[in-house]
Image (cartoon, helix red, strand yellow):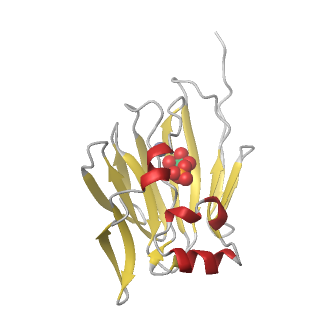
Amino acid sequence: MNYFEPFNSYIDLEEMKLNSEGELIIRKLSDMVDMFQNKKAAEEALKENPIIYKVYNVQIPEESGHLQHCISIVYPGKIGNEYYMTKGHFHKIKETSEIYLTLKGRGKLIMQMPDQKLRVLDMEEGNISYIPPYWAHRTVNIGDEPLIFFGVYRGDAGHNYGIIEEKGMSVIIVEEGDKAVIKNNLAN
Ligand code: M6P
Ligand code: ZN
């Protein structure tokens, strides 16, 4: 039998850094510019090309017995009136689930089934959100500080961005009169 050594990672919430050996993914606006609805605002913001979010992955084998886990930081900001968000994905192995624990900030977790059924959960400090099998998931920062959350999912689940990259999700989250509002995505 192949033993894998137990280990700790450490999240420093002030520094917003995960202390582990894994891969750090940095997504800038240029990596997802087509996902925002206001094309003019997106083009304007591209001049600065802000970081939209970071994902600190702990290095774990992509095997079913393991649990991938990571810390994501979605920065505060908007493109037009649409809040910064993650790209969003289904899992490659569709029947695998995921858990998010919100550590800091305020957000929304949009989930969507292949038949378009939709659910939106609040992400607030201490919330543990369960993303059941088959639901696509995207997080949106609706606050004015970074949204920081821990995610854990089956080792071999994988990411499938395809259809969300092409069509988006069926709702978007925008600021209207100081409030986060869920709107139908007319482009979907
Ligand atoms: C969470 C997890 C990660 C995911 C990240 C960013 O931390 O679900 O697996 O990579 O959010 O989301 P996305 O991959 O959709 O950009
Ligand atoms: Zn996932």
Coordinates of residue 176 in the picture (x, y in percent): 35, 85
Between 27 and 66, the residue placed more toward the observer is: 27
Coordinates of residue 171 in the picture (x, y in percent): 33, 63
Q: Quadrant for the N terminus, please.
A: top right
Coordinates of residue 122 in the picture (x, y in percent): 34, 64
Residue 6 in sight here: yes
Left-right relation of 9 to 65:
right
Q: Quadrant for the C terminus, please.
A: bottom left
Instruction: Name the residue located 42 percent from the left edge and 54 percent from the top edge.
Output: 167
Between 131 and 171, the residue placed more toward the observer is: 171
Residue 77 in sight here: no
Coordinates of residue 59 in the picture (x, y in percent): 68, 38
Left-right relation of 120 to 45:
left
Instruction: Name the residue located 37 percent from the left edge and 31 percent from the top edge.
Output: 95
Q: Which residue occupies the extreme bottom position in the image?
A: 177
Q: Which residue occupies the extreme top position in the image?
A: 1
Instruction: Name the residue located 52 percent from the left edge and 23 percent from the top edge.
Output: 65
Between 125 and 153, the residue placed more toward the observer is: 153
Instruction: Name the residue located 71 percent from the left edge and 78 percent from the top edge.
Output: 47
